[in-house]
Amino acid sequence: MTRTISPAPLTAEAFAPYGTVIAHRGETRRHPIRLDHGDAGRDGAIASWVTRIDAAIGGDTAHEITAFERHPHSDQAFVPLSGQRYLVVVCDGTADDRPDPATARAFVAGPGQGIVYHRNAWHAGMQVYDAPAEFFVQMKRVAAGPDDEFVALASPLRIACPEEAPA
């Protein structure tokens, strides 16, 4: 059975169980961002790259999520470089350590908002409403073992069109 959820605007409070919203808040010159490259017991290195997404999902049609992923050794940061809106879909894990689509939440990130997924947070792959889009990405890559875990869903998760997406 396909479940449909509507995306909400991305806010720091709503996204907090899954990660951090990267955006300046407050009156001070600097707003610190915590990025945990944990799993200190595993050899590895901080990896940084720019990723480009050429295809937009469009804001006027529903979109389906068919898999979730997570990163067991590090937080993962995405910082938009090209001022676009993008879709952020997260969910909790089940008792047997798999993504739980019944708990899924979807957010529309506006221009000027980056995100940090917490280590082991289940999330969908990056999808953008406006393309082309470029992101600075950073996470820890370990010397041995997988950096990414992907799980296909038994049935797709449908994301409705954003009704009030940030412009």
Image (tube, grey):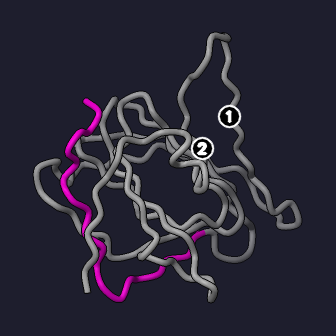
Mark found first going from the N terminus, 2 or 1: 2
3 left or right, relative to 145: left
Residue at screen point 64% across, 50% down: 47
Residue 33 is tagged as: 1
Q: Is residue 151 above or below residue 46?
A: below
Q: Is residue 121 above or below residue 98?
A: above
123 left or right, relative to 56: right
Q: In which quarter of the image is residue 2?
A: bottom left
- For label 2, the residue is 20
Residue at screen point 26% across, 62% down: 159
Residue 123 at what x, y percent from top left?
A: 48, 64
Q: Do the residues labelled 2 and 1 touch (CB within 8 Å)?
A: yes
Residue at screen point 38% across, 83% down: 153
Residue 146 at what x, y percent from top left?
A: 64, 75
Q: Nearer the viewer, residue 37 or 90?
A: 90
Q: Is residue 71 above or below residue 113?
A: below
Badge 1, how many Cα within 10 Å: few under 14, some, many 20+? few
